[in-house]
Image: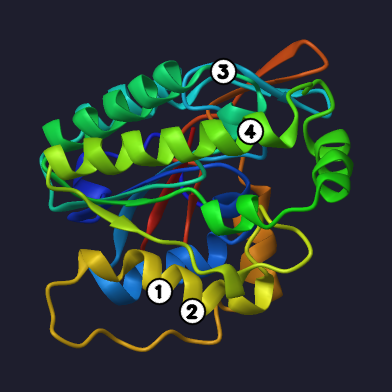
């Protein structure tokens, strides 16, 4: 661990910004490993993540609330740092569909996130929606998963699928206009759960997702994925700058952690 009062002289000279939700949260140890291999290290790493995270609205999961990614303190924190070579990931965009936010609003939130990253001169990769999983999803499984993960949802699968296709196309166009690389999510990375990448696929999946950061003709091969259970538990234990639980506001100073190789961690 490090003090949240670390000075800029103590910070690594390379930066990573990770924006996402449950896939990013579940696989964060493997993601950080891939960041080191593909972008170098140590890193000044910022992550806006969390199960059920929305890009532009407060999200609530099992009594815990997080601000939208756009409303988080990440942006001011990054802008307060000296300029540095920066790579960024935008992923887990589909949650807002299941919160029944309209496509235009979601697209605008993501576009604002992309523009903010480009203003920071970040090299950005963005994952597309797992359209193949949605198209092949049985109605009974959709209803079951929605009841567990998004219990307030009421839209039928047909409406969600139609909106997902529209949003995916909007995001592809937005990325192309900004010369941002998009990554198609491989159906084989998923199992019974069509939303979350299987843990045994994390090393391959995150390597493929982030390899666009590297300009090398050949990138390092993925490892077995993330330094083991102890490192995974440590990264899961770190608290974001602002959250609430059962209506009680909680704050945590940032940076909130440091890895043995010198990477500094800030969660929002």
- Calculate the distance from the C-alpha at mark 1 to the C-alpha at mark 4: 29 Å
Where is residue 76 drawn, in percent x and y?
A: 29, 22
Q: Nearer the viewer, residue 86 or 180?
A: 180
What whole-number distance in Å separates the C-alpha atoms at marks 3 and 2? Answer: 31 Å
Q: Which mark is residue 10?
A: none
Q: Is 41 on the left-hand or right-hand side of 246? A: left
Q: What residue appears at the point 30 percent right and 65 percent down from the top-left corner? A: 42
Q: Secondary structure at mark 4?
A: helix
Query: Which of the two labelled residues, at mark 3 and mark 1, occupies the earlier sequence position?
Result: 3
Query: Relative to the observer, which residue lies in front, 6 or 236?
Result: 236
Q: Earlier in the sequence, mark 1 or mark 4?
A: 4
**Residue holding disc 4:** 160
Distance from the alpha carbon under mark 2 to that under mark 1: 5 Å
Can you see residue 4? no
Between marks 3 and 1, how big is the CA–CA gap? 31 Å
Pinpoint residue 31: horizontal percent, then vertical percent: 47, 64
Q: Earlier in the sequence, mark 3 or mark 4?
A: 3
Cβ–Cβ under 8 Å for marks 3 and 4: no
Q: Report which quarter residue 221 is drawn in.
A: bottom left
Residue at 54% of width from left, 16% of height from top?
57
Q: Which residue has dot 3 on it?
A: 101
Query: Dot 2: few (<14), some (14–19), or many (≥20) neighbours within 10 Å?
Result: some
Q: Nearer the viewer, mark 3 or mark 4?
A: 4
> What label sits on residue 204 in the rendered view?
2
Q: Is residue 124 left or right of residue 231?
A: left
Precedes in sequence: disc 3 or disc 2: 3
Q: Residue at x 27, y 39 (%)?
A: 7
Residue at mark 1? 207
């Amino acid at each position: 661990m490090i003090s949240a009062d670390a000075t800029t002289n103590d910070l690594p000279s390379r930066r990573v910004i990770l924006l996402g939700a449950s896939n990013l949260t579940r696989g964060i140890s493997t993601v950080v490993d891939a960041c080191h291999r593909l972008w170098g290290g140590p890193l000044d790493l910022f992550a806006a993540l969390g199960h059920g995270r929305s890009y532009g609205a407060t999200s609530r999961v099992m009594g815990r609330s997080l601000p939208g990614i756009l409303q988080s303190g990440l942006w001011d924190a990054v802008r307060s740092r000296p300029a540095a070579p920066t790579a960024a990931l935008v992923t887990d965009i589909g949650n807002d569909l299941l919160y029944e936010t309209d496509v235009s609003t979601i697209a605008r939130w993501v576009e604002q996130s992309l523009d903010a990253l480009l203003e920071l001169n970040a090299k950005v990769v963005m994952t597309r929606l797992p359209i193949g999983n949605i198209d092949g999803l049985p109605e009974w499984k959709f209803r079951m998963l929605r009841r567990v993960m998004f219990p307030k949802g009421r839209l039928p699968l047909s409406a969600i699928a139609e909106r997902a296709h529209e949003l995916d196309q909007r995001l592809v166009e937005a990325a192309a206009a900004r010369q941002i690389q998009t990554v198609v999510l491989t159906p084989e990375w998923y199992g019974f759960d069509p939303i979350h990448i299987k843990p045994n696929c994390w090393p391959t999946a995150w390597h493929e997702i982030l390899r666009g950061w590297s300009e090398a003709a050949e990138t390092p091969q993925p490892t077995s994925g993330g330094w083991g259970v102890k490192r995974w538990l440590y990264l899961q234990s770190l608290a974001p700058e602002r959250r609430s639980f059962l209506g009680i506001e909680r704050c945590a100073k940032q940076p909130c952690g440091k890895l043995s190789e010198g990477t500094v961690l800030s969660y929002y």
